Structures are given as structure tokens and as C-alpha cells.
């Protein structure tokens, strides 16, 4: 009996090992995933997501600002960090190249960052980078209250999920299929419904979200630097009602403050046939093409935020 159980256990273990390596081979084209804790996300990070500087940012080391150079710092979450895309394909690098030698764009994107994280990043950026301009990147999920967890689907490994997820491609594929089954049976919580409660501008959730945004913009204003905000829609669903409503609410805050804010919906809707705004079917983060579209939109928008000629002249005179 014991020998039979031992043989069964060894057989199962060997089968899982074979399936694991087979899954890695079959899904070798997956560059990253929306969940940045997965095996594929870890693999992508090892290949493309490195190059972290001394500040822990996916950016080159930041030296002393050169005379005649206007330094622009962009603060944001995984969208700005560039989850799923090469470093050189991010909108910050594209904008840096388009602006030319008189300007420098630095990326202070932190995956999973919220308003509280942005406040800390603002302080770090001002202290370490000596910027002339601060730009805040906004995404719809920033409205989530601190400490509140979004609804989640049941996980295949339950409490062991976080121990298995980073190391197993097989588990990621199986757990994703498990989640899709829950959704098809109507058993999975609806994340869209969670954010839809913020769409009513007079509702308590929206009022609280605006107050948190106001507090963050107060911190931004306290730097005394030129500043602005770019508003990213959800790249996998540009016409979602709650997403548009939240952007419209943020734009009202911008208007009340006379803060230059760029609504990126028009730029991302101008998508030619055959081009995708997301990394892949496994990762709904913005694609390299989406980053390119945003960089172009920002290039035309920046003169509203900064008098490009006078700023360059002012820095040249330093």
C-alpha cells in the first residue's frame, strides 16, 4: 500500500514538472501579465524590467541637472513604469527624444502606486532630481480608497497562491482558466461594478475620491514648480461609462484649479486598424503603440504647461 502511494506521488510530481516546462514552452510568447506577481511577469521583469536606479526607479541614474536643460519628472503607477513594454518604448522616453537636447524627461513610475505613494514620490523627486516641471499620471483606479481591497475571484491555490504564483507558469494558466469559469457562471465579483459606484459625482465614494485628489494636488502645488496632470483611460475599454465619468470629474478639478490637464481619450481613440492599445490578451497595460500615441499628444500639450522657449532661455541663463 505504501509503495503504491509512493509511486503515485512520484508519478504525479513528475507529471506536474513535465506540464510546467511544457506550459513555459507553449506560452513562451507571453511577455508579461496584468498581474505583476505572476511567473510570466517575473520573467519579463528579469528580461526587460530591470535597470533600476539607486532610487528604485526604472530609470537611469539621475545626475546633476545640466545648465540650459529643463528637467521634467513624470510621476505615476505601472502605466508610467511601463509594465509589459521595453524601457525605450515608454511615453517618457519617446517624449524625451521628441523634445530634444534642451529638455530632459525622467520617469518616476511605481507599479501599484496610489495617491499616498504619489505624495511620497513627489517629495523624493523634488529632493533628488531638482525638477523644473512635475507631471502627474492619473488612472481610474486611483479613486480606490487607501486600505480598501477590490473584489477578487477565488484563487485555485487559496492561501498558497502568493507562494505558487511567482514560480509556476502552469499555475498561472490554470488559475486564469479557473477565474474565467467563475466569470462565465456569474460567480466572480465584478471589478467594473466596484468602480462604477464612483461614477455618481454627488455620491459619497466620488466625493471622497475628489477630496483625496485635491489633497494630492495640494502637495503638488506646495512644490512651487510648474505642474500638470495627464489622464489615462482604461486602454482595454476606452468607452466604459464609469471610466469616462471619473475622467470628467478629474477634469472639473483641474478646471477649478486652472491646472493644465491632458485628457488622453482622443489620442488613444485614434487607433488605426490592426494596432492594439494593450500589451496582450494576458496584459491590459498600455502597449508600445499606446505609449507612442500618448507621447505625441503630450508633445503638443506641453506648451500649455510650459512656455517652451522662455523655459529653455531661463535655464540657459542659469
Image (tube, rainbow, N blue to C red):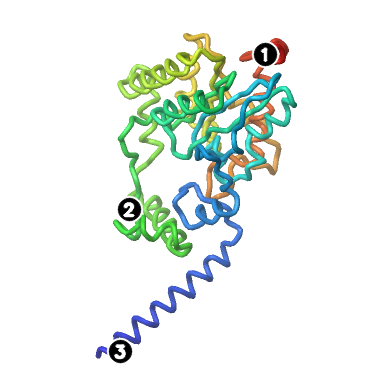
Contact (CB < 8 A) between labels 2 and 3?
A: no
Q: Identify the mark nearer the N-term, 1 or 3.
A: 3
Q: Position of residue 215 (x, y in %)?
A: 39, 18
Q: Is residue 143 shown left or right of residue 53?
A: left
Q: Nearer the viewer, residue 296 or 106?
A: 106
132 up-or-down from 52: above or below: above
Q: Residue at x 53, y 13 (%)?
A: 259
Of the two numbered discs 1 and 3 in the rendering, the one whose residue sits closer to the viewer: 1
Q: Position of residue 138 (x, y in %)?
A: 49, 27
Q: Which mark is residue 85?
A: none
Q: Which residue is mark 1?
A: 318
Q: Report whether residue 293 is seen.
A: yes
Contact (CB < 8 A) between labels 1 and 3?
A: no
Q: Is residue 201 shown left or right of residue 294?
A: left
Q: Position of residue 44 (x, y in %)?
A: 56, 53
* CA distance for labels 1 and 3: 81 Å
Numbered disc 1: secondary structure: loop
* CA distance for labels 1 and 2: 58 Å
Q: Residue at x 57, y 56 (%)?
A: 30
Q: Which residue is mark 2?
A: 154
Q: Which residue is mark 3?
A: 4
Q: Could you tell me which quadrant the C terminus lies in?
A: top right
Of the two numbered discs 2 and 3 in the rendering, the one whose residue sits closer to the viewer: 3
Numbered disc 3: secondary structure: helix
Contact (CB < 8 A) between labels 1 and 2?
A: no
Judge the density around disc 1: few (<14), some (14-19), many (≥20) Cα neighbours within 10 Å: few
Numbered disc 2: secondary structure: loop
Judge the density around disc 3: few (<14), some (14-19), many (≥20) Cα neighbours within 10 Å: few
Q: Residue at x 58, y 19 (%)?
A: 133
Q: Identify the mark nearer the N-term, 1 or 2.
A: 2
146 up-or-down from 209: above or below: below
Q: Could you tell me which quadrant the N terminus lies in?
A: bottom left
Amino acid at each position: 500500500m505504501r509503495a503504491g502511494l509512493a509511486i503515485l506521488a512520484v508519478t504525479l510530481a513528475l507529471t506536474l514538472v513535465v506540464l510546467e516546462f511544457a506550459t513555459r514552452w507553449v506560452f513562451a510568447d507571453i511577455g508579461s501579465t496584468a498581474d505583476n506577481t505572476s511567473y510570466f511577469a517575473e520573467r519579463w521583469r528579469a528580461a526587460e524590467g530591470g535597470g533600476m536606479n539607486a532610487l528604485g526607479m526604472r530609470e537611469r541614474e539621475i545626475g546633476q541637472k545640466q545648465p540650459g536643460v529643463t528637467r521634467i519628472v513624470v510621476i505615476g503607477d505601472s502605466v508610467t513604469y511601463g509594465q509589459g513594454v521595453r524601457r525605450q518604448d515608454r511615453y517618457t522616453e519617446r517624449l524625451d527624444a521628441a523634445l530634444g537636447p534642451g529638455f530632459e524627461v525622467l520617469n518616476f513610475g511605481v507599479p501599484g502606486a496610489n495617491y499616498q505613494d504619489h505624495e511620497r514620490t513627489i517629495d523624493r523627486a523634488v529632493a533628488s532630481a531638482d525638477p523644473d516641471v512635475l507631471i502627474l499620471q492619473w488612472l481610474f483606479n486611483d479613486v480606490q480608497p487607501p486600505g480598501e481591497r477590490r473584489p477578487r475571484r477565488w484563487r485555485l491555490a487559496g492561501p498558497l497562491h502568493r507562494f505558487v504564483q511567482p514560480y509556476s507558469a502552469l499555475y498561472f494558466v490554470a488559475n486564469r482558466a479557473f477565474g474565467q469559469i467563475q466569470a462565465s457562471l456569474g460567480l466572480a465579483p465584478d471589478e467594473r461594478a466596484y468602480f462604477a459606484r464612483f461614477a455618481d459625482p454627488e455620491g459619497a465614494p466620488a466625493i471622497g475620491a475628489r477630496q483625496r485628489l485635491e489633497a494630492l494636488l495640494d502637495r503638488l502645488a506646495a512644490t512651487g514648480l510648474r505642474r500638470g496632470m495627464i489622464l489615462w483611460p482604461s486602454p482595454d475599454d476606452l468607452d466604459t461609462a464609469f471610466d469616462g465619468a471619473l475622467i470628467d470629474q478629474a477634469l472639473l478639478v483641474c478646471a477649478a484649479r486652472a491646472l493644465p490637464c491632458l485628457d488622453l481619450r482622443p489620442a488613444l481613440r485614434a487607433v488605426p486598424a490592426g494596432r492594439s492599445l494593450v500589451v496582450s490578451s494576458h496584459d491590459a497595460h498600455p502597449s508600445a503603440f499606446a505609449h507612442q500615441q500618448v507621447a505625441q499628444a503630450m508633445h503638443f500639450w506641453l506648451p500649455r504647461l510650459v512656455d517652451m522657449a522662455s523655459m529653455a532661455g531661463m535655464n540657459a541663463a542659469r
